[in-house]
Image: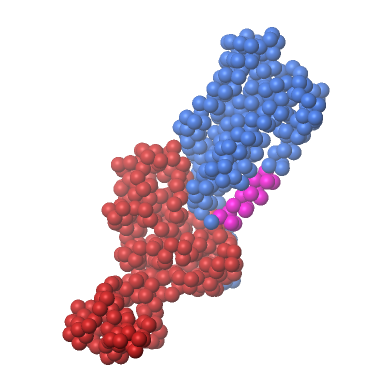
Amino acid sequence: MQPYIEVSQLSKTYGNHLVLDQLDFRLESGEIVAILGANGAGKTTFLQTLLGMLRPDQGQIQLFGQPVSALKQQMSLRGKIGVMLQQASLPGNLTGREHLQLFSAYYPAPMPTADLIANFGLASFIDQRFSTLSGGQQQSLLFALAMVGKPQLLFLDEPTVGLDVAARQAFWQHIRAAAAAGISVILTTHYLEEADQLASRILVLKDGHFIADASPTALKAQSLLRRIDCHSSLDSALVASWPYVRQVEVIGANPSADGEGSQRLLIDSEQPEQTLRQLLALDLALSQLSVQPLSLEHAFLQLTANQGAMA
Amino acid sequence: MNSPLHQQVTESTAFTPWLSVRQRLQLLALEARMDALSLFRTPGFVIPSLIFPVMFYLLFGVLFGQGGQNVYLLASYGCFGVMGPALFNFGVNVANERTQGWLAMKQIAPAPVSAYIFGKICSSLGFALIIIVLLFSVAAIFGGVRLETHIWLGLAAVLMLGTVPFCLFGLWLGLTLSAKAAPATVNLIYLPMAFLGGLWIPIHLLPAALQQFAWALPSYHFSQLAYQVVGVKATATSWPHLLAILLFCLVMVALATRAFRQTTNTRQ
């Protein structure tokens, strides 16, 4: 079975900033892939390059086994994909129904307008002008437009950015329904939760590279880690040997100058309560204590490191 | 890559049209209808576009006009009246729709760009027709203009066809300008172009240098063709003006095509 998307050695620079650095990527039929990354990490650039909207500096992109440049000429290839661009908006003077009507005319056998209205909960606002709709309603309509042509593959660029929690969860239902209908999805997001809720595979884009490529289950295990930050005179090797402790990092170790022999320890633990009990029992002088969830970036760096160790 | 299956796929898609003829006609009709709806729901566009040519005609042709100017001014303000909406509908709306990502959405969807442009030309022509009917009525009722039927129709036809070069000009501007800059820039082009083309003040009242310069303006050639139809103040022959307008159209098509390629390749 041919992959839906196949990318090799893809690079893209803006000025002298390398946004995408020799990326390889495949998306198979049935996958729901989330590209996760901070704002400015290059997620949108990646997606737009896949769609032929941006020209890469180098690398090959194939959609359904055809070079991406074929999108320009082949309506049938364009008909296989549905797209929600980031912050795209429609002429505000037309109603949702009018937009659906027009977009339906682009396809030989579009999904019936009535089905779209029912499936994506558009009924209450379908006859209002686009400019009067709320952010969530606009995104639902744009999603319906992406689905008009019964696509096999959906591209969603930050589909829920700017939506409130309720609207975001409502929107996730649309994506789940599409996935349940057998449509593959590639979406970008900077919400870990969104990727976790929807994706079968999560890729983290940072400094032009995918620093992780994992299932949400692997990700979840990782996100249980907590980071204990404290000043202590305990030996870091000893702490590292305790159960549940994954890793200990020593920062600015300078025992003699500090008098007490204290140093700053960063302890990553799966059971922070257990680890804290031991720490406090053994070091009565322990100070400047804080416990925080690991940052996403740290979790993924660890994840990749662990996977490397296992392999 | 070169498996028989792959070749088959390419060939079959190359020979099977994406939409049937009937569907393509429906698409063209829908694009035109939706663009016209969107246009007519913009009061900020409709009201000034309809009022200005009529108001100018009433002021300078009827209230303060000296006799014998009525027909001449009808042709002048007719040109002025249809030029604006064509320039604005394309220049401002294409810039907006490009900036808000609507054009990009259509290009990724299997929407032919030609249908988009066709729809906009139709809505511009429809709007021009309304201005023509309005202006002709005012001229006949308040300006006492009496023309033979074929001259009324001939003038209407010239005014309708004459909007096309300005649609193309607007298209190029819309593909080049940002949404923010478009309205002001289009105004900065529209009003001087109308004035220097002799649409407000007869061209022979302008300094000689400006009269020479008018040859570079499509508005001048457009108005000369309109004057010839109604038989007032026209230069001797019409073919140099037709040729100039045709040339202008070709240049605009070339510029718009280049701008279109650039926007699709460097869009952020």
Q: Nearer the viewer, residue A251 or B228?
A: A251
Residue A202: % across, % down: 38, 70
Up-down relation of residue B206 to residue A96 (above or below): above
Residue B262 sits inside the magenta stretch? yes
- Judge whether residue B200 can be spotted in this image: yes
Q: Quadrant location of residue A307?
A: bottom left
Name the residue located 70 percent from the left edge and 30 percent from the top edge.
B219
Name the residue located 61 percent from the left edge and 37 percent from the top edge.
B186
- Judge whether residue B148 can be spotted in this image: no
Q: Which chain is red?
A: A
Residue A301: % across, % down: 39, 77
Q: In the rendered view, does B186 fall on the left or right side of A271? A: right
Residue B260 sits inside the magenta stretch? yes
Question: What's the colour scheme?
Answer: by chain
Task: Please report the bounds of the magenta region as a residue range.
Answer: B253-267
Q: Which of A221 and A247 is in front in this view?
A: A247
Residue B90: % across, % down: 58, 38
**Magenta segment main secondary structure:** helix
Name the residue located 59 percent from the left edge and 22 percent from the top edge.
B53
Name the residue located 51 percent from the left edge and 28 percent from the top edge.
B46
How many discs mark residues in the rendered view? 0
Q: In the rendered view, does B264 fall on the left or right side of A275? A: right
Up-down relation of residue A111 to residue B190 (above or below): below
Q: In which quarter of the image is the N terminus of chain B?
A: bottom right
Q: Nearer the viewer, residue A150 or B128?
A: B128
Q: Quadrant location of residue B139?
A: top right
Up-down relation of residue A138 to residue B223 (above or below): below
Residue A228: % across, % down: 27, 77
Q: Which chain is blue?
A: B
